[in-house]
Amino acid sequence: MSKTMSAAVLHGTQDLRVEQVPVPQAPARGEVQIRIEKVGICGSDVHYYQHGRIGDFVVEAPMILGHECAGTVERVGEGISHLQIGDRVAIEPGVPRLSNALSHFYMKRGQYNLCPDIFFFATPPDNGSFCELVNHRADFCFKLPENVTLEEGALIEPLSTGIYAARVAPVTMGDTVVITGAGPIGLMNLLACQAAGAANVVISDQVAARLNVARQIGATRVVLGEANELKSIARELTDGRGADVCIECAGHPSALKAAIGAARAGGVVVLVGMPVGDMADVNINDLIVREITLRPIFRYNNTFPTGVDLIASGKVDVKPLISKRFALKDVPEAFEYVIANREKCVKAIVSL
């Protein structure tokens, strides 16, 4: 077996190289070694590429990018019974290290996404999955049924954000939902809300091409540009009440205001989009008088089995979101393509 493998390594701002790196050692007890075959390019990957940081997460040493991934089990460590060599799996990229009491506290509550010591692919200083082989905790690898492709398996990660938002809200049968932002995460939230039983899903964005995809996958109404129109549409669809749930995926103050304005009294606004700056310009009196609940989410937890089932059953189809495909050797060009075509490229997939 070769001692090196190909990987896409970020060395600095806009310095992404496909180069040889050491292959991982044999998987430890409780781990499997996976040959990565499909990886989606996420907005966070692009942000690290362009800026070298996301908030307090700063790239200070060369780091392999990528976290939306699926592949095939090549080696199995001790103590594993639910996976075997040859199984195709979707990989949940966040694994708590459980190195302190606080992490154990959140793990026991099922909120492992809040563990302060969590390992997460391509979040500094942890390497990601734009590489041929990775070792990963087996209980964070989910076997794919025969009717689910590896491309679909890779997209269970971004779909998980939508599943988690719909679960936290919660979105229930017959609800009217408003989503601000029709990028990849907004569109995944649209799919998840439909699967949860929402009767109406209205989505807004500044880009017409994204809204065309939203129409294709079943949005009830789309709003181009003027997010304030959401309030009147939500009331029109609900006999004047407003949306039961609003999901803010744009990470912009005006979108947050529009989401709050579109919510009915007693409604919920879920905060998904990560803002670049301050989002604090909110009318607190309005929240109090109308009893609007704000529910921020960070990543997700316990969502991958649901994602596998939704795709396998046909209740969710993520394939229309795939805009472009690339090979690993072309990853630097793929990132430049995604940046240059932000308005029309929803999701690019890299094959290894």
Image: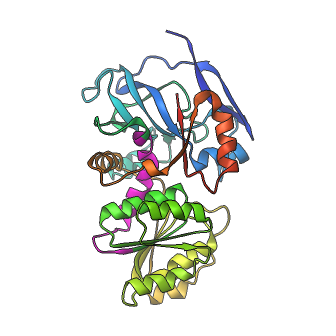
Q: Nearer the viewer, residue 225 or 295?
A: 225
Q: Position of residue 233 (x, y in %)?
A: 47, 83
**Residue lying furthest top:** 1
Is residue 166 located in the magenta-colored stretch of the structure?
yes
Residue 58 showing in the rendered view: no
> In which quarter of the view is residue 142 placed?
top left
- What stretch of residues is rendered in magenta? 152-176
Q: Nearer the viewer, residue 177 or 120?
A: 177
Q: Nearer the viewer, residue 186 or 27?
A: 186
Is residue 164 located in the magenta-colored stretch of the structure?
yes
Q: What residue is at 63 percent from the left and 27 percent from the top?
A: 329
Q: Main secondary structure of the magenta part?
A: helix
Q: Nearer the viewer, residue 134 or 326?
A: 326
Q: Position of residue 151 (x, y in %)?
A: 44, 39
Q: Position of residue 350 (x, y in %)?
A: 54, 35
Q: Is residue 350 left or right of residue 289?
A: right
Colour scheme employed for the rendering of this structure: rainbow
